[in-house]
Image: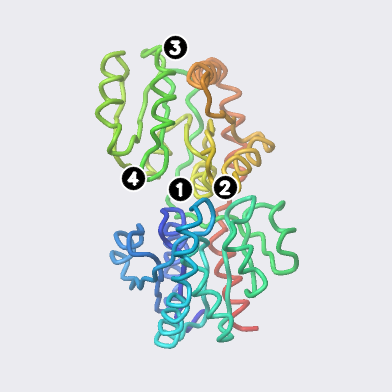
Amino acid sequence: MIERGVLFAGGGTGGHVYMAVAVIQRLQELGSSPEILFVGTRRGLENRILPDLGVTVERITLGGLKRTGLLKAFQTLLQLPAALLRSVGILRRFRPGAVVGLGGYSSGPVVLVASWMRIPCLVIEPNVHPGLANRLLAPWVDRVAVAFEETAGRFGRKARLTGIPVRPQFHRDRKHPNAGGPLRVLIFGGSQGSSAVNRLVCEALDELSPERIRLVHQTGSRDRSRVEERYRKLGFFGAVLEYIHDMPERLHWADLVICRAGALTLAEVTAAGKASILIPYPYAADDHQRTNAQALVRRGAALILEEGEEAGPALARMIRDLDRDRLQLGALADASGSLGDPRSCDRIVQVLTEIIHE
């Protein structure tokens, strides 16, 4: 039982926020409803999502260190003392029973100060290759929740294999790919969309049959009109959306998913038990998206496509092959579903309870 408040630190990206949402909702379902505080960034998605759940959001200002250039890295170092002092004030006011770090640089000062104040700390590492923030925080925390066995060895005895917490809606009503009929394909590139993924899909449409495919494509705001016009010109049936608000429903509809390889994206795809073609973002820190994608490919749960000049035609061939071979499509879906563990949130709550009562 978790009686005192829990502070979540991270934010900025949808992945961090939705992991927190999943754990918070599970705490509420279990009847363990401690007060929740989220510490994030001023522009993060948490500011739009969490207040609707009754969660208070506090903010700190801190940039990144990797892939930022010398000037921004120097600015981040100058911001660090103020971020640490801000974290001290937040922790003294809220006095949580535990702190959960979700990754990202905004989690660093909060988790570090909490450790100095002897508050139990857990960090969640959803990627195969741990991010820099969690690697730096590892010596200071009590436990590290990881999603992959190959990640656990990097954190030694502190590691707990929990899986990635996702909202329970993704685990419900799993549907096997259709044995016949048009192939239903869901395409998305993160909350803001991906121009590179949009371009590859538009190139692939030249070599695909409108009669054999149905599409739902989340493009982001910049590319929507261009992609919509491309669909209309080639006669494809589909919904072109700036943003997907009902991702669980869209995933359950799909026979095949084409997407990036961020950790939470893969957690949601595998929770829904969907076959996927993964297009890793080539400039991700530590190339972690490619590492994530390769982990699914090794388990027979996905195919991987690298960006490049011939990637559009290659994507078309992959889609055609899966349309023709529904047995392979089903095998990918079965392997994907075997990786989506509905007990991940329970395991996170168990680890939280463990560190609080040690």
Q: Which mark is residue 207?
A: 3
Q: Label 3 neighbourhood size at 10 Å, few (<14), some (14-19), many (20+)?
A: some
Amino acid type at image mark 2: Gly
How many labels, in total?
Answer: 4
Q: Which amino acid type is shown beneath numbered disc 3?
A: Glu
In the picture shown, does residue 314 fall above or below 81? above
> Is the residue under label 1 in contact with that under label 2 (CB below 8 Å)?
yes
Marks 1 and 4 sit apart, C-alpha to C-alpha, by: 10 Å
* Residue 158 in the image, given as x and y percentages of width and height: 70, 69
Q: Position of residue 15 (x, y in %)?
A: 46, 53
Real-space Cα separation, disc 4 to disc 3, in angstroms: 29 Å
Dot placed on the residue nearer the N-terminal end, 4 or 3: 3
Q: Which residue is mark 4?
A: 246
**Rendered image quadrant of residue 240:** top left
Q: Earlier in the sequence, mark 2 or mark 1?
A: 1
Locate residue 324 relative to residue 181 in the image: left or right.
right
* Tag 4 and tag 2, C-beta contact below 8 Å: no
For marks 1 and 4 on the same chain, the one whose residue lies earlier in the sequence = 1
Which tag is nearer the camera, tag 4 or tag 3? 3
Task: Please name which of the two marks, 1 or 3, marks the residue nearer to the observer.
Answer: 3
Q: 84 or 216, which lies in front?
A: 84
Q: In whole angstroms, how far apart are the C-alphas of marks 2 and 3? A: 33 Å
* Label 4 crowd (10 A; few <14 / some 14-19 / many >=20): few
Q: Which residue in the protein does label 1 denote?
A: 170
The residue wearing badge 2 is 340
**Residue shown at the point (62%, 37%) measured from the top left:** 335
Q: Secondary structure at mark 3?
A: loop
Q: CA distance from mark 1 to mark 3?
A: 32 Å
